[in-house]
Image (spheres, coloured by chain):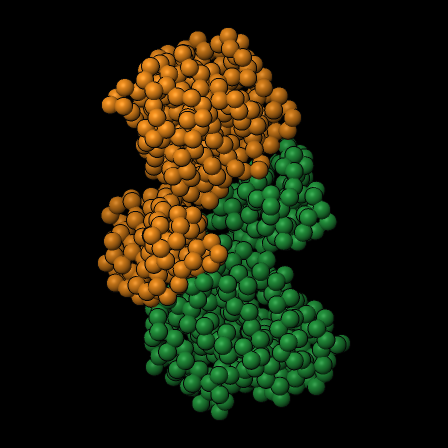
Chain colours: A orange, B green
Amino acid sequence: MSVTSAQGFRAAGVTAGLKASGKPDLALVVNDGPLDVAVGVFTSNRVVAAPVVWSRQVVADGRARAVVLNSGGANACTGPEGFADTHRTAEHVAGLLDVSAGDVVVCSTGLIGERLPMDVLLAGADAAASGLAADGGGDAAIAIMTTDTVPKTAVATGAGGAWTVGGMAKGAGMLAPGLATMLCTITTDAVVDAATADAALRAATATTFDRVDSDGCMSTNDTVVLLASGASGVAASLAELTEALTAVCAELARKLVADAEGASHDISVRVVGATSEDAAVAVARAVTRSNLFKAAIFGNDPNWGRVLSAVGTVPESVAPFDALTLDVSINGVQVCRAGGVGEDRTLVDLAADREVHVVVDLHAGPAEATVWTNDLTHDYVHENSAYST
Amino acid sequence: MSVTSAQGFRAAGVTAGLKASGKPDLALVVNDGPLDVAVGVFTSNRVVAAPVVWSRQVVADGRARAVVLNSGGANACTGPEGFADTHRTAEHVAGLLDVSAGDVVVCSTGLIGERLPMDVLLAGADAAASGLAADGGGDAAIAIMTTDTVPKTAVATGAGGAWTVGGMAKGAGMLAPGLATMLCTITTDAVVDAATADAALRAATATTFDRVDSDGCMSTNDTVVLLASGASGVAASLAELTEALTAVCAELARKLVADAEGASHDISVRVVGATSEDAAVAVARAVTRSNLFKAAIFGNDPNWGRVLSAVGTVPESVAPFDALTLDVSINGVQVCRAGGVGEDRTLVDLAADREVHVVVDLHAGPAEATVWTNDLTHDYVHENSAYST
């Protein structure tokens, strides 16, 4: 059900014809109210796609009525013409829904540097508007897929089931969100104001999507939009909404990692004993960005030397620690103790499970954080050399 | 000839038995003077191998008599025992050469996290000392190879041939130097003092080894040592020595990239129009660390969208530029103009040559810099998942 699990929303997913594969490629999510609260977080990449420029403006006033999303083209690096295409898409959808164009969020994903075929896209929008349904969330989640192999949805409830949060996301490559991740639309029927919704969404994404670093490459199109209809009639506090949003975002983020391009392992790098959460994140991210470490995990090699060599690249000013006290465990085996050799590395079994758990103890403070990544595989290289995204 | 091209040096390369392959694995370079000037630059990784800790101390006074280098084991993350092994190596070589242990630089490369077999290593040192020869530089260059497929040497002269600079280097993976690269020993017979030698070496490495970023992974063992014998009797100025050292370092750095693990393309990313050289380096490094860009080049795909998405990750505070004025050319074809679509990307031929030249124009200032990297290939993944380094 995803984005239509909460009351007050309709959605559709159709095949406009943007993808050569002929698979569904256009989704529409509409908030029927009574509220029209909308907030968003976007990529921190300085090279941003036209839809990001547009949609930042749309949610600036905390209100929106609809989100139109297409796969089959990112509309990034397409100049003023690309921005005009996004504007025209919003105007067209606004006309179909009898709302203001300034209340239509636009999201695009696919190849960078090519214009979208607008006649195809607008005809698809017509079909999507005609097909809007209170159970259309599943179709919408399918229509935003690119190299994803499965649609990704998640649902959580608050206040004992009185209100619901539902979401959908896509993303399998260029997956190292800077403030968000690829495309994600979340809906809720809780009664909230825009300020509360915005604070809750930022808190939820900071510890979920921002802790995914699949391949170190930040997208130009990352967008997470939250729409609130208020249709449940029940108010949510900031704490309640943050909890439910975090649950939905964490589940979607985990599903992104599980479906990352070419990956054979999902790897959690948990850094403990840090002086601050930021320090722990910086150290974890250094490990998750080491191609040598990621290739070793692909080879089921518990190569802790590559963990330490990555940890050591983090500046002292960012994460204070003493290199001679570092501990590393992999899947529960403490292979490195006090910066040197620990338990026998052959005790680590990486072949048994897709999940790999690395823990680095900095012995410098009380803070910790976990970043998820994937291994570096032949299939990742193949998919990203043979397929233009 | 490499490190024995300059007068006043002897070298040897022998098979001690540290490598399972039975290939040469121990090198010795000796400075017979009259000067014993020695300076070095080392990895900026905070996790450093025992030989780096030792050798930093050795060259702290600007003097050394010999460099002993082994492949087949990095002696990194080996605790106090590993440091004792390095110390013992220096003491042993010092005894063989009748010099002070505090004048023997030690370098090691290979797997992190394992002790070296000291009896094997010291017997190898005996053999190397017996085999020292004024034409031993070639053998020494072979003995420091790990996954390198060819030995890497370079020679330059100064003052119209009055003095010579010669060097050898190894390195094919974990190749993103922080202040130096893997192992490199350079000799000169110019008459210089330690301060001049140090300034020249830092200037030379800053624009050569520091501009190589093959796989984004910084080593724990990076060491570049320069020995000066003064045997030519001719003094070199800072400018002259810097010029000759830069030529040798640039040639060795280029050879490292050309022999990088699994690579099928050598890629120069030149950033022009930057506000400062540091800004240009930061932008170039962001591109050279994009796995998606590197995989695209492997697939002979001139995917400039992946260049722009990487450029956009550099913070404004580091490199000011306007994303809407960015130009990108690949092998001379301007595929991106003003942040949007430029010439037809199919005009770019990447299959014809191992070298690929990317130019990014930030249109923000007069500064420029070039960073070299490699493509991301099946063979890189294979070599680094099947082989523990």
Q: Compared to A54, does B131 lie above or below? A: below
User: Residue at point 25% right, 57% down?
Assistant: A333
Q: Quadrant of residue A354?
A: top left
Visible in this render: residue B121?
yes
User: Residue at point 30% right, 48% down?
Assistant: A356
Residue B103 image point, x, y percent: 51, 83
User: Residue at point 54% right, 77% down?
Assistant: B60
In terms of depth relative to the viewer, which is nearer, A379 or B179?
A: B179
Tell me the quadrant of the picture where the N terminus of chain B can be found. Answer: bottom right
In terms of depth relative to the viewer, which is nearer, B45 or B303?
A: B45
Is B168 on the left-hand or right-hand side of A322? Answer: right
Q: Compared to A133, does B119 lie above or below? A: below
In terms of depth relative to the viewer, which is nearer, B127 or A124?
A: A124
Q: Which residue lies furthest to the right in this view?
A: B160
Q: Compared to B235, does B115 lie above or below? A: above
Visible in this render: residue A12?
no
Residue A163 image point, x, y percent: 30, 20
